[in-house]
Amino acid sequence: MKKKKPDEKLWGGRFAVGADPLMEEYTASVHVDKRLYAFDIRGSIAHAKMLHKIGLLSGRERDVLVRGLKEIREEIESRRFRFKPSLEDVHMNIEARLTKKVGEVGKKLHTARSRNDQVALDLRMYVKDEIVQVISRLCTLQQALLGLAERNRDIVFPGYTHLQQAQPVLLAHHLLAYVGMFERDKERLRDAHKRTDVMPLGSGALAGTSIPIDREFVAKELGFSRISDNSIDAVSDRDFAIEYLSGLTLIGMHLSRLAEELVIWSSSEFDFIEIGDAFCTGSSMLPQKKNPDVPELARGKSGRLLGNLVSLVTTMKGLPLSYNRDMQEDKLPVFESTDIIKGTLDVFSKMMETVQVKTDSIADALRGGYMQAVDLAEYLVKKGIPFRESHRIVGKIVSYAIEKGKALEELSGEELRQFCEHFGEDAVKLLNVRVSVRSKTSPGGTAPRGVAARIRSWKTRLSKEG
Ligand code: ARG
């Protein structure tokens, strides 16, 4: 590639020598930031209208610019637009094309504007838009989980701590834990949205401008609730993108935990669920295999989400005010994490619909897990025995049962009384896992009545949103 004359650049005025092709290639970002084209064009249309409102563009000039910008949008959408790396980024590609299309008046568009506030505007518009889309996908996944919980509302399930059987719970209760996590994720994104919803255009390169611009007008045109109040901060702040990435990382972390459980539950050792064939893959060598690749990849991709968050925080942490070109590296992590999260939420929502719960093997797993032990201890507490003492007594009962090769539910009242005279015949009933679950009536506990009420309230809540 031969060196171009400096004047071919939109900023070429002060340069004596043309750009080196290697430098152009290294600094170009258009292959990444062209994704912002629709926001860039909307921002430019609002800016042109404002320039007319303050008398810097005639009505005709404004119309020519707006029409030109809309045509460029069509060219891009019908793939007739050729993005040129030599024009660095999406902003200059669009501006150069505009001037080529509409002539001299195109050169007026960049009045009172810098790419620094322009790119901040575009990225804020993009993040606002994606937050809304991610929240709606989170709702869909919550609904899928709720459906699975409802279809299996009576299933008693082993609850784990340390991945050791701990206490029987309702499977529905377990699934609602994820519905709650995704609700917090939505709240976090809504909160991030408030701080993203600040309009930076009109900050210029960093200091503002001497031109009497109307920033409130632009904010209104573009649906922002307020304008930024410090031009230096406005062009150099990427907190909103970091908050967004951190919200996406937490969603990814929650999805990864769910994924891990799906992988474990579908192993032949657990055999608690079967994921539909349409969402599993086979092995190229082992004919019998049916692999849970979707949850595995979700678990894997959660690492990239965290990587992207760390990447942007690291890019930002050493930068002096205000704008620095380093900040051009902000877009890739933001775009990539957005794609990962939207893709994972979409596939998970569909996959959860295909999950079959294997009630027989769950019932098998519940047998002999000694998970009702604490219920016996709480029985003795109700008879006035201090918890530490009843804990010790029941510990002895468990080791007696293990020694005899019996499950807890196979013990008789008489056997219990060998360890403590306070055990009545009613204590034997407690050894049933369903009775155990029914007894957890404390607020937030797994008792079926409470779980059913929470399923109902989630349903109403989510149907209002969706
Ligand atoms: N492509 C740049 C970015 O994404 C736009 C702003 C460039 N500003 C500048 N003065 N070079 O950050």
Image (cartoon, rainbow, N blue to C red):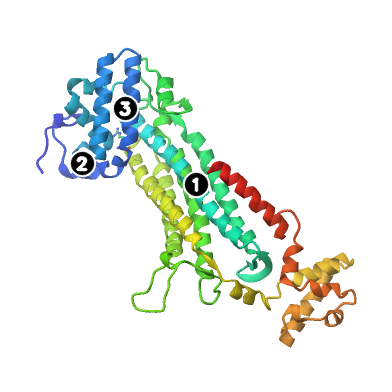
Image position of 320 with respect to 369: above or below: above
Which quarter shows the N terminus?
top left
Decide if residue 17 is on the left or right side of residue 294: left
Q: Residue at x 37, y 17 (%)?
A: 213
Residue 204 in the image, given as x and y percentages of width and height: 35, 25
Residue that numbered label 3 is attached to: 44
How far is the residue under mark 2 from the one under mark 3? 21 Å
Residue that numbered label 2 is attached to: 85
Residue 105 in the image, given as x and y percentages of width and height: 21, 20
Does dot 1 land on a helix, a strand or a loop? Answer: helix
* Residue in front for this viewpoint, 367 or 30: 367
Q: Residues within 10 Å of mark 1 (few under 14, many from 20)?
A: many
Decide if residue 384 is on the left or right side of residue 363: right
Ligand 1, image quadrant it occupies: top left
Residue that numbered label 1 is attached to: 247
Label 1 is placed on what type of residue?
Answer: Gly
